Image: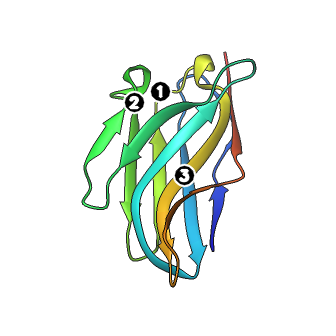
Amino acid sequence: QVQLVESGGGLVQAGGSLRLSCAASGNIFSIADMAWYRQAPGKQRELVAGITRGGSTNYTDSVKGRFTISRDNRKNTVYLRMNSLKPEDTAVYYCAVEARSYGSTWDDYWGQGTQVTVSS
């Protein structure tokens, strides 16, 4: 099994910055894609940014130029640097990974979520 622990959320004023981290642990054989999603109250969960094991990235249009996703494969950790935050970025942020445990098949794993609140 793979466990994901997120950190770095909090309350910030508009224009401020935050850095989210998500560390994977457990009986990990390999991790492929890693991603950050978010879900605002009353809205569906949406993909914010994704990164492949090789470092290719993709972003939803609303965060392009403001957010940066990165990963450290040695630490099994994915990061999301968020700059120029806006009130509409307020949401619970979840990390997700596609991983394989020893003796198991590829599966998707989710973190517990971390709250990001941006005040105007």
Q: How many labels does the image show?
A: 3
Q: Residues within 10 Å of mark 3 (few under 14, many from 20)?
A: many
The reply to whether discs 2 and 1 touch (Cβ–Cβ < 8 Å) is yes
Which element type, helix, strand or loop, lies under badge 2?
Answer: loop
Mark 2 or mark 1: whose residue is earlier in sequence: 2
Three-letter amino acid code at the position of disc 3:
Ala
In the image: residue 120, left or right of residue 35: right
In the image: residue 21, left or right of residue 115: left
The reply to whether discs 3 and 2 touch (Cβ–Cβ < 8 Å) is no
Q: Which quadrant of the view contains residue 25? A: bottom right
> Residue 34's x, y, as percent?
44, 54
Q: Residues within 10 Å of mark 1 (few under 14, many from 20)?
A: some
Q: Distance between the residues labelled 3 and 2?
A: 20 Å
Q: Which mark is residue 84?
A: 1
* Residue ID for mark 2: 66
Three-letter amino acid code at the position of disc 1:
Ser
Foreground label between 2 and 1: 2
* Residue ID for mark 3: 96
Q: How crowded is mark 2: few (under 14 residues within 10 Å), some or many (20 or more)?
A: few
> Residue 67's x, y, as percent?
41, 36
> Residue 93's x, y, as percent?
63, 40
Q: Is residue 77 above or below residue 7?
A: below
